[in-house]
Amino acid sequence: MKRKWFNLAIAVACIFSMSVPAMAAAPVVVSEGKKVKMNFTLESDGKIVDKSFETKPFEFIYGSQSLLPGLQKGVTGLKGGDEKKLVLKPEEAFGLVNPQAVVEVPKDRFAQKDIKPGMFFSAPGKNGAPMKGMVKEVRPATVLLDFNHPLAGKTVQFNIKILEVS
C-alpha cells in the first residue's frame, strides 16, 4: 500500500510540474560589475566620427572603466537586444573646451618643418604620459596646439545596441 501512495505522489508531482509554466529568469541588465558588449555609432555635427557595428563590439565592465558620464547613465538598466539613441551635451560627453589646453609652442621644437593646421602631435603631459594635440594655427615663429579632445564643446549622439550583458 505504501508503494502505491508513493507512485501516486510521484505521478501527481510530475503532472503538476508539467502544467505549471517554468518561471523565466529575469534578464541581466547593465549594472555595477556587469560585462557589457555593445555596438555603437558616434555622431557629431551630423557626421559619423566612430562606430563599432562593422568592427569588433565595444566591451567594458560597467563601473570599473571610465565611460563618458552621459553614456554610462544612458546604458544603465538596459539588457541584451535593447537599442537606444543618446544625445549628450558637452558636459555629459567630452567636456567643455578648456582655453588653457591651447598652448603656443616655438616652431623650432618640432622636428617636422612642414606643419599644417589639423595635424596631430604628441607631447609629454604633466604625469609624463603622452598627450595628443592638434595644430590649430601656424604662425611665423610658433605653432598653436590644442590639447582639448576634438569633440570637446560639442553635442554628440550615440546610437547604441546592447548585444550582451553578463
Image (cartoon, rainbow, N blue to C red):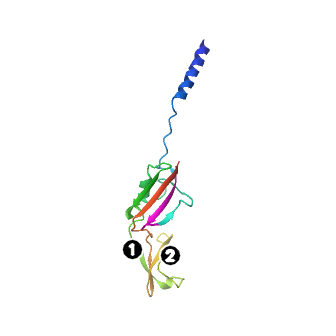
> Which residue is at a point 45% across and 77% down the rendered structure image?
145
Residue 111 or residue 150, whichever sits in front:
150
Residue 45 - label: none
**Residue bearing mark 1:** 100
Q: Quadrant of the N terminus?
A: top right
Residue 67 seen by the camera: no
> Which residue is at a point 49% across and 59% down the rendered structure image?
40
Residue 116 or residue 159, whichever sits in front:
159
Task: Estimate the x, y position of residue 116 in percent, counting from the top left.
Answer: 49, 81
**Residue bearing mark 2:** 120
Magenta-colored stretch includes residue 46: yes
Q: Which amino acid does label 2 sit on?
A: Phe
Magenta residue span: 36-47
Which mark's residue is nearer the viewer, 2 or 1?
2
Crowding at mark 1 (Cα within 10 Å: few <14, some 14-19, many 20+): few
Left or right of 155 on screen, residue 59 = right
What element does badge 2 sit on? strand
Relative vertical location of residue 6 with respect to residue 109 in this rendering, above or below: above
- Residue at the limit of the structure toward the bottom, as seen here: 140
- Residue at the limit of the structure toward the top, as seen here: 1
Q: Mark 2–mark 1 contact, CB under 8 Å?
A: no
Magenta residues: mostly which secondary structure? strand
Task: Estimate the x, y position of residue 85 in percent, counting from the top left.
Answer: 43, 57
Crowding at mark 2 (Cα within 10 Å: few <14, some 14-19, many 20+): some
Task: Estimate the x, y position of residue 57 in percent, counting from the top left.
Answer: 54, 57
Q: What residue type is labelled 1?
A: Gln
Task: Estimate the x, y position of residue 48 in percent, counting from the top left.
Answer: 48, 66
Relative vertical location of residue 63 with respect to residue 155 in this rendering, above or below: above
User: Which one is earlier in the sequence, the residue at label 2 or at label 1?
Assistant: 1
What element does badge 1 sit on? helix
